[in-house]
Amino acid sequence: MEAKKFIAKVLPDGHLSLPEDTSKEVGRIFEVILLPVEEAEIYTYAEALAEEKRFSELTEDDIERIIHESRGIR
C-alpha cells in the first residue's frame, strides 16, 4: 500500500482538487482524512522531528498528546 499526501482545495461544487496523477485513478477508492493546512503543519513538523530523533515508536496519538501538552491543552 502506498500513501499519498498532497494539499487539496474544496471546489465550489464540493469536490476536492486532486493532483493530476491521482485524478486519473477514476473508480479507485481512497480513505480520506481532511486536516486544515494551518493545523496540519505542526503534525508534519512533529512527525519529522520524531523521526530525526529516533522516536519512531511514537504513534500519531502520542505526537498529538505532546503537541497539546506543550500548548497547555488537556
Image (cartoon, rainbow, N blue to C red):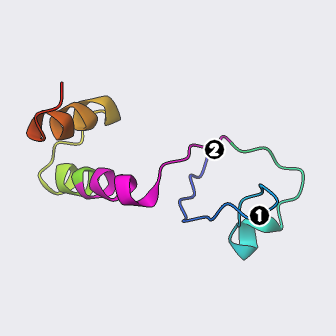
What residue sits 88% from the left and 58% below the top? 26
Q: Is residue 33 magenta?
A: yes
Instruction: Tell me which amino acid carries mark 1.
Output: Pro
Crowd tier of the residue under label 2, counting other residues whose Cα lies within 10 Å: few below 14, some 14–19, many 20 or above: few
Q: Which residues are magenta?
A: 31-45
Q: Position of residue 71 (x, y in %)?
A: 13, 41
Crowd tier of the residue under label 1, counting other residues whose Cα lies within 10 Å: few below 14, some 14–19, many 20 or above: few
Instruction: Tell me which amino acid carries mark 2.
Output: Val
Q: Position of residue 69 (x, y in %)?
A: 12, 33
Q: Is residue 23 magenta?
A: no
In depth, the one of 11 and 27 nearer the eye is 11
Q: Main secondary structure of the magenta part?
A: helix
What residue sits 89% from the left and 51% below the top? 27
- In 3D space, how far apart are the residues under numbered discs 1 and 2 (Cα atoms)? 19 Å
**Residue 32 drawn above or below residue 26:** above
**Residue 61 drawn above or below residue 22:** above
Q: Is residue 72 visible?
A: yes
Q: Secondary structure at mark 1?
A: loop
Q: Secondary structure at mark 2?
A: loop
Q: Position of residue 10 (x, y in %)?
A: 67, 60
- Seen as rendered, the residue at the extreme front is 12
Q: Which residue matches tag 1?
A: 12
What residue sits 48% from the left and 49% below the top? 35
Query: Would you say 33 lies left or right of 38 here?
Result: right
Q: Quadrant of residue 74?
A: top left
- Seen as rendered, the residue at the extreme bottom is 20
**Residue 22 drawn above or below residue 60:** below
Circles 1, 2 touching at the beta carbon (< 8 Å): no
Q: Which residue matches tag 2?
A: 32
**Residue 68 drawn above or below residue 22:** above
